[in-house]
Amino acid sequence: MPTYETLPRFTTDFQHLTPAQRRRFHRVVREAFVPDLRTRCFRPSLRIKRVRCAPGVYELTWAPDGRATWSYGRAVVAGLPHIVWHRIGTHSILDRPLTEDHLAGQPHRLAA
């Protein structure tokens, strides 16, 4: 099972989402992102692409105007991908896709 961590800005952004937006994000991660992460072949509907102004950072589309930025982190469990979540919100987060603080959060396992 892939692992993940959330940076403080992601946590703050996430708290500003509505309960419905949070549920949708979790569903997309659980039903699409995690299965695709295992194969590293992402389905087109996730619209995974690199963020031009932030090397090594990718965006994920989880709703028509729902975006999250993330990067691959150092493996916590050998052989499993580790995801670092940077930002979440509307398309406007792409103006500042990285956080000023790159402090590591607590690693977790992504749900299948």
Image (tube, rainbow, N blue to C red):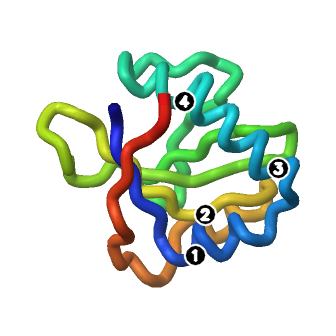
The residue beneath circle 3 is: 21
* Disc 1: which residue: 9
Q: Helix, strand, or loop for circle 4?
A: helix
Label 4 or label 1, whichever comes before in sequence order: 1
2 vs 4, front mark: 4
Q: Residues within 10 Å of mark 1 (few under 14, many from 20)?
A: some
The span from disc 4 to disc 1 (Cα, nearest Å) is 21 Å
Q: Which residue is mark 4?
A: 33
Q: Left or right: 63 with respect to 68?
A: right
Query: Sequence order check: which comes first, mark 2 or mark 3?
Result: 3
Q: Quadrant of residue 23?
A: top right
Q: Nearer the viewer, residue 55 or 32?
A: 32
Pointer 4 local density, CA inside 10 Å: few below 14, some 14–19, many at least 20 = many
The 10 Å Cα crowd at callout 2, few under 14, some 14 to 19, many 20 or more, is many
Q: Amino acid at mark 2?
A: Arg
The correct choice, above or below, for 89 with respect to 66 in the image is: below
Circle 2 residue: 87
Alpha carbon of mark 2 to alpha carbon of mark 4: how far? 16 Å
Marks 4 and 3, how far apart at CA: 16 Å
Q: Residue at x 67, y 59 (%)?
A: 88
